[in-house]
Amino acid sequence: MQFVDQWTIEWINHHVVFSIFMNKIIHMIADNDEFKGLLFMTIFWSLWFHNSKQSSNRITLLGMLTGSFFALLISRTITEVIVNRPRPMIESTLNFRIPSGLTLDLLPKMSSFPSDHAVMFFGMALGFLFVSRRVGVFAFSYTALFIAFPRVYMGYHYPTDIAAGMLIGLVVVFLFTKQPIIRYMIEQLIEFGQARPMLMYPFLFLLTFEFATMFDNIRHFASGLLGHSM
């Protein structure tokens, strides 16, 4: 797998675009929440209020969020405790050329394996697919082209980082959206919330805000306590 990773990274890096403008566009798409979490949370709220099979869809959507959260916890545990893999952009054996016009400041302490972005957005794409095939296909395609690929292009991740993250996200979200006992618990939670909308919707708003920013504020707070960048 290391050979495949190295060959793919070197091939992509050999064909990097030397247009400063184009590289900045790719960088902007990869690093701005408006093109990632905010878009997916807009889709979430649109599907939440869609009339077709509303009750069942809401159980699936909340299961998707819950599963994505636990998948991110699993991913972060692997990154911080189990695997320490330098990012391609700082791996000396690759001679990685940073795309022209970009200044990438990711700290070397942060392991590249697995990709949190792949965990979260492929997992959410699966949840959207269970609610709407058309939206799910769009979400999968968008994640592959505009979230996953740019992170390989810029040297943030190896292809296997993306593949592992995708697998974690898909498996955990599948369990949280399809297991009867989990669906029953989420259904009870939604019924509790519907009787108290003044509690449920502010909480859901805050939760989707954190997903839109990939829990950046919480992660920065935790990194300050731990003494290193997350």
Image (spheres, rainbow, N blue to C red):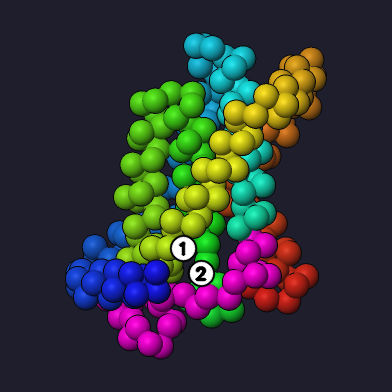
Q: Amino acid at mark 2?
A: Ser
The structure residue drawn at horizontal position 67% and vertical position 54%, both measured from the top left corner, is 73
Where disc 1 sits, the SS reads helix
Residue numbers of the magenta segment: 76-104
Q: Quadrant of residue 199?
A: top right
Q: Amino acid at mark 1?
A: Asp
Q: Is 146 placed above or below 112 here?
A: above
Q: CA distance from mark 2 to mark 1?
A: 7 Å
Is residue 219 part of the magenta span, yes or no? no
Given residues 214 and 2, the one toward you in this image is 2
What is the total number of numbered labels drawn onto the structure image? 2
Q: Is residue 176 visible?
A: yes
Given residues 34 and 147, the one toward you in this image is 147
Q: Is residue 210 visible?
A: no
Q: Quadrant of residue 177?
A: top right
Where disc 2 sits, the SS reads loop
Q: Residue 193 appears at what percent x and percent y?
A: 76, 22
The structure residue drawn at horizontal position 35% and vertical position 35%, both measured from the top left corner, is 138
Is residue 82 part of the magenta span, yes or no? yes
The N terminus sits in image quarter? bottom left
Asked if the residue under mark 1 is in contact with the one under mark 2, i.e. CB atoms within 8 Å, the reply is yes
Q: Residue 210 appears at what percent x and percent y?
A: 63, 46
Residue for badge 2: 112
Q: Is 189 placed above or below 22 here?
A: above
Residue 150, numbered label: none
Residue for badge 1: 161
Q: Reading the chain from its start, which is encountered first: label 2 or label 1?
A: 2
